[in-house]
Amino acid sequence: MTDIPSARPAARCRKMAWRWILLAVFAGASLLLAVGAGSVPIPPLKLLSALFGAGEDNTRELVVGLRLPRVALAFLTGAALAVGGTVMQSVLENPLASPFGLGVSAGAGLGATAVLVTGLSAGTLGAVLLPAAGFAGAMVTVLLVLALARALDRRVSTVTVVLIGMVASLFFSAVMDLMAAMSPEYAQRIGLWQMGSFASRGWRGPAVLAPVLAVCLGVFLSRSGQLDLLTFGDEQARSMGTEPRKNRRFLILAVAVLTGAAVSFSGIIGFVDLIAPHVARRLFGASHRRTLPAGALLGGSFMVLCDLAARTLCAPREIPIGAVTALLGAPFFLWIFFAGRERQ
Amino acid sequence: MLEVKNLSCGYGREKVVKDVSFTLPERGRLAVLGPNGCGKTTLLRGMTGFLPAEGAVTLDGADLLKMSPRERGRAVAELPQASAAWFAYTVMETVLMGRYAHLKPGLFSAPTRADREIAEDAIRRLGLWEERDRPLTRLSGGQLQRVLLARAFAQTPRVILLDEPTNHLDLKYQVELVRELKGWCAQPGHAALGVFHDLDLALNFADLVLLMEGGGAVYFGPADALPPQELSRVFGLDVPAYMRRSRARWERIGG
């Protein structure tokens, strides 16, 4: 499922370099566009001067205090979900797997919802508790899904894992619905949560998510060779000199940390973790050394643009971000899937 | 060179392979034969420690079951059945993965120029040079199997284990694969062991045979001395008579 033709190596390198440049330009442009556009459009020159600390105070306040943290959170969330999706697909040897499908997102959501309804989310304590509950929910889900998969199927085949993940995902969503029904005062916030939102939360989210993403991305990149091997399945990965079971457990837990952090700030957002890795593999090949950073940039930019659509299309009202990613993502995914299939 | 002593293994408490022993000498080519469910694949999985096993598996005196994953990867390569590839690695990237066990351990380790040359040699050897930048997802089953063999060669192991590698392959590819493997085994310090379904192909490949029945070994010795009555009994079919009839059919077709 890739578009790289059998060109001579030099030509291929040049082509690849161009793709990286275009991707960087695309990411930069979508960030600038998203910061500039909104209820008060800011022209590019004013925007740049505000970003560098010059210009009028109101503009600077709007840019640095409101739009930039929101755009940053959207970008980091998109990047985190894309990186988590890439790794999940590889360790489960299944290009259709994702943290969302595995129930990890729903588990993280449930953890954060539990903090929300108990009223513990307020204040400084909440700032720590919310993402921590997100991690915990994601971790517990992963462990539960893997333990159940092991109990049902000794060899923990990917089909079993994906099926149980689906069941867990639906079940946790139902529990979240139940919590919302039982505590009407939080129902609206929980509802927002289930579809995701980047509505102004200041710099707290980006400040926590950025280091988590950086560390996880570093860990995954340092193991990119191992990830490449794992896509071939346990027996082959093992025969090439790695220990698949132990490594897979570690990698899945790292994905849970990353997804838990992302979900705890912005809610459950689907499809980005499925699509971004696909597009990254198509454009840059399957090797994780390239897929991981490319997927992060693509997922981040895609999320920023989706959030832009979410807050401008029906302004002053906002469309839930999860609805936007699903509306764009579902047909897009079908298109890549069938386009890829046709050519095989 | 490779010595398997009283090996028993299985899934959970149930032992599928029971007390199997044999020795594979340098440059040896061993075919494991037996009817479905007799434990051939389980034997391979036990030999590499993929399944928990009792007994001993030693390669030149070193315990294979106690090796680190990397040590084992440098000693033994496996050629699996190629069905389909899910991820679009190029042929070159895939063959280069065979060098994983030889990379300097540690994070961010990358293949060196020497690794690359070994991979390129393996690719040329299997006639895949023109395909080196193509993604696996666009290869035919025969090409994919050759890529995996190139990867096994690039691993520069001492022993290659094969698990019904020729299933789903056209006759031409089966014959080519066996020829490549025999060529590899002819080099000093090499040996191969394969599970085969096709008896004819197995005898084309092997100079040694391990005949299995119900998880145990009923014959181990030179392929030429394989007792026909044992073969027929284990498979529940008069194998030599079947082969003779088959040959007569081909003689009629060939004129």
Image (spheres, coloured by chain):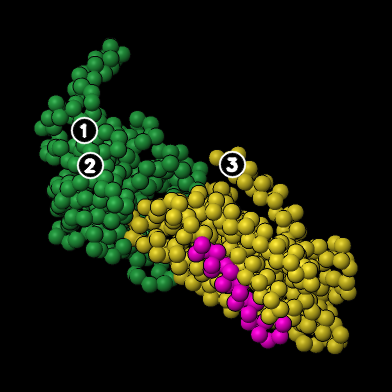
Q: Which residue is mark 3?
A: A341
| Amino acid on which the number 1 mark rests in the picture | Leu
Q: Is residue A38 above or below residue B234?
A: below
Which chain contains the residue that carries disc 2? B
Nearest the viewer among A229 and A191 is A191
* Chain A as rendered: colour: yellow
Question: Magenta region, mostly helix, strand or loop?
Answer: helix
Q: Is residue A133 magenta?
A: yes
Indicate the position of residue B40 as horizontal and vertical percent values. Answer: 26, 42
Q: Say which quarter of the image contains residue B38.
A: top left
Q: Earlier in the sequence, mark 2 or mark 1?
A: 1
Residue A271 visible to the viewer: yes
What residue sits 27% from the left and 60% below the top? B72
Query: Same subunit under labels 2 and 1?
Result: yes
Q: CA distance from mark 2 to mark 1?
A: 21 Å
Q: Say which quarter of the image contains residue A101.
A: bottom right
Indicate the position of residue B71 as horizontal and vertical percent values. Answer: 27, 63
Q: Which residue is mark 2?
A: B215
Which chain contains the residue that carries disc 3? A
Give the structural element (helix, strand or loop) at label 3: helix
Which chain contains the residue that carries disc 1? B
Image-based side of A248 in relation to B185, left or right? right
Q: CA distance from mark 3 to mark 2?
A: 41 Å
Q: Which residue is mark 1?
A: B203
Which residues make up the magenta segment? A122-144
Indicate the position of residue A198 as horizontal and vertical percent values. Answer: 74, 71
Q: Residue furthest front?
A: A182
What residue sits 58% from the left and 69% below the top? A137
| Amino acid on which the number 2 mark rests in the picture | Gly
| Amino acid on which the number 3 mark rests in the picture | Arg
* Chain B as rendered: colour: green
